[in-house]
Amino acid sequence: MKRILFLFLGGCLVVFALVYAFIYYVPYSEGVRSGELIKISKKGVLVKTWEGEISQGISGAQIFSFSVLDKDEDVIQKLKDYQGQYVKVNYTERYATFFWLGDTKYFITQVEQEQSPHFRN
């Protein structure tokens, strides 16, 4: 009986590890988006994650929500510095996410300041 329980729990642990590795390391897509950075915040009750939003339209009707991993401290600092400005972000989309990684499937990997196409000279 103990052996069956041990094998069952070990099998469950292996399956969870494989699912986690697939979700964390295998990207669904990668891309670039740009817009006005309207929000960056660290939120959550039990686990705090960095979440943000980019407005991709003049009226704010097209909002791109994203997450940032805690290990990307330079990206977080740049997002804080560029708050309210026009930015271009590189992101990785995953198949799913876990609550301790972020709220969205989109994770920002790089950010740079851009000139707004609405106010060019």
Image: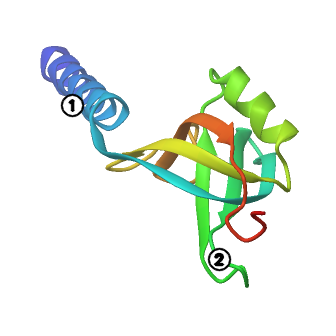
Apparent side of residue 42 relative to residue 13 in the rendered image (left or right): right
Q: Type of residue at label 2? A: Gly
Apparent side of residue 4 relative to residue 29 in the rendered image (left or right): left
Q: Position of residue 57 (x, y in %)?
A: 65, 77
Q: Type of residue at label 1? A: Val
Q: Residues within 10 Å of mark 2 (few under 14, many from 20)?
A: few
Query: Which residue is drawn at the image coordinates 85% and 56% (left, top)?
Result: 84
Q: Relative to 110, is 9 above or below?
A: above
Query: Which residue is drawn at the image coordinates 29% and 25% (left, top)?
Result: 17
Locate the C terminus and report the quarter of the image it occupies: bottom right
Quarter of the view holding residue 100: top right
Query: Which residue is drawn at the image coordinates 33% and 32% (left, top)?
Result: 20
Residue 15 image label: 1
Residue 79 image label: none
Q: CA distance from mark 2 to mark 1?
A: 42 Å
Quarter of the view holding residue 120: bottom right
Locate the N terminus and report the quarter of the image it occupies: top left
Q: Name the residue nearer the viewer: 53 or 83.
A: 83
SS class of the residue under badge 2? loop
Apparent side of residue 116 relative to residue 68 in the rendered image (left or right): right
Q: Residues within 10 Å of mark 1 (few under 14, many from 20)?
A: few
Residue pointed to by mark 2: 57
For the residues bearing labels 2 and 1, Cβ distance under 8 angstroms: no
Asked if one can make out residue 7 in the rendered structure from this viewpoint, the answer is: yes
